Amino acid sequence: MEDMSALLTRVADALDRMAPPVLAMADPAMAPAYVWRQGVLTATTHFRPLPLDVLTGIDQQKQILLENTRRLAAGHAAHDALLWGSRGMGKSAMVKAVVADCRKAGSDIALIEVSADSLSSLPALFRLIGGMERRFVLFLDDIGFEEQSPAPRLLRSLLEGGAEARPANARLYVTANRRNIVHRDMREQDDPINMRDVVDDRLALADRFGLSLGFHACDQDHYVAMVAGYAQRLGLVFDPLDAIQWATQRGARSGRIAWHYVQELAGRAGRSVDGLE
């Protein structure tokens, strides 16, 4: 009997060693940015967004989102925001940049990045940060839902009207490649239900956002201006024709492509991009 008890003790000890450590909950009043994952709030160790003035070609969207974030930081009425459109046009970079800009101006506001698979645990996050004087931007990046996913209805409830709607000191900033977020296809037109009802249901989530900002593919002049803005900030010289060729080889023009080209420029010159990141 004693041998069996000792064996069970050794097995239990081995299982304890194999189990992942329990993550400690970060203090939501301290760090500039966090990640919410598996019901645990973790402070980020590296939060240095691109400066807001470096993001070019999207000035109107930038000003609108910055003003909304300033209102949130000041405790005034502010909107949840949907940033949708072309890949690589600065949607995610802008969300981080406006929070950093408000912090630089002295506002006590923080960013919390939330993954799509953590939506069901958001009520726990709301309870953690609700009632605090501090303001929060809850950042859901590159969201997209498949047709049968229950997540869109959950997010709609969190945005507006649900029992666990987000607290007054927090707003959701969501980025997506599609305005309606939920996948659509031509089969909707063959649906036995009224087609208008199907489309309205798909758009119901997008309509919950007070702000909806579109980001569209840039033309050649805007792309070169983006490269120039990055290059000037880093003290790099570039040939516009070389920058255009770089984009042509990748089949797209965007802020992301411009940034990749400037990283290539810095590498050629034996420089780093730490002064801008």
Image (cartoon, rainbow, N blue to C red):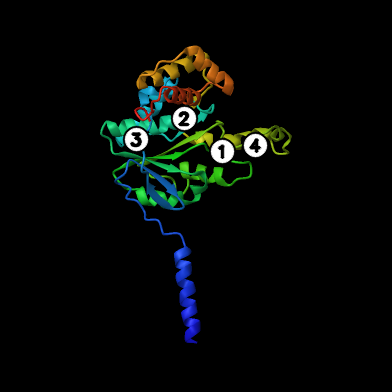
- Residue 208 vertical position relative to residue 6 in the rendered view, above or below: above
* Distance CA(mark 2)–CA(mark 4): 28 Å
Residue picked out by circle 1: 144
Assess disc 2: are there few (<14), some (14-19) or many (≥20) residues with their C-alpha within 10 Å of its C-alpha.
many
Is the C-beta separation of discs 1 and 3 under 8 Å?
no
Q: Which mark is residue 72?
A: 3
> Type of residue at label 3?
Leu
* Distance CA(mark 4)–CA(mark 1): 18 Å
> Type of residue at label 4?
Val
Question: Mark 2 or 4 closer to N-term?
Answer: 2
Question: Mark 4 or 1 closer to N-term?
Answer: 1
Q: Where does residue 9 sit, x and y in percent of width and height?
A: 46, 76
- Residue 44 vertical position relative to residue 187 in the rendered view, above or below: below
Residue picked out by circle 2: 91
> Which type of secondary structure does the marked residue at label 2 adopt?
helix
Q: Is residue 49 left or right of residue 196?
A: left
Q: Is residue 232 left or right of residue 143?
A: left
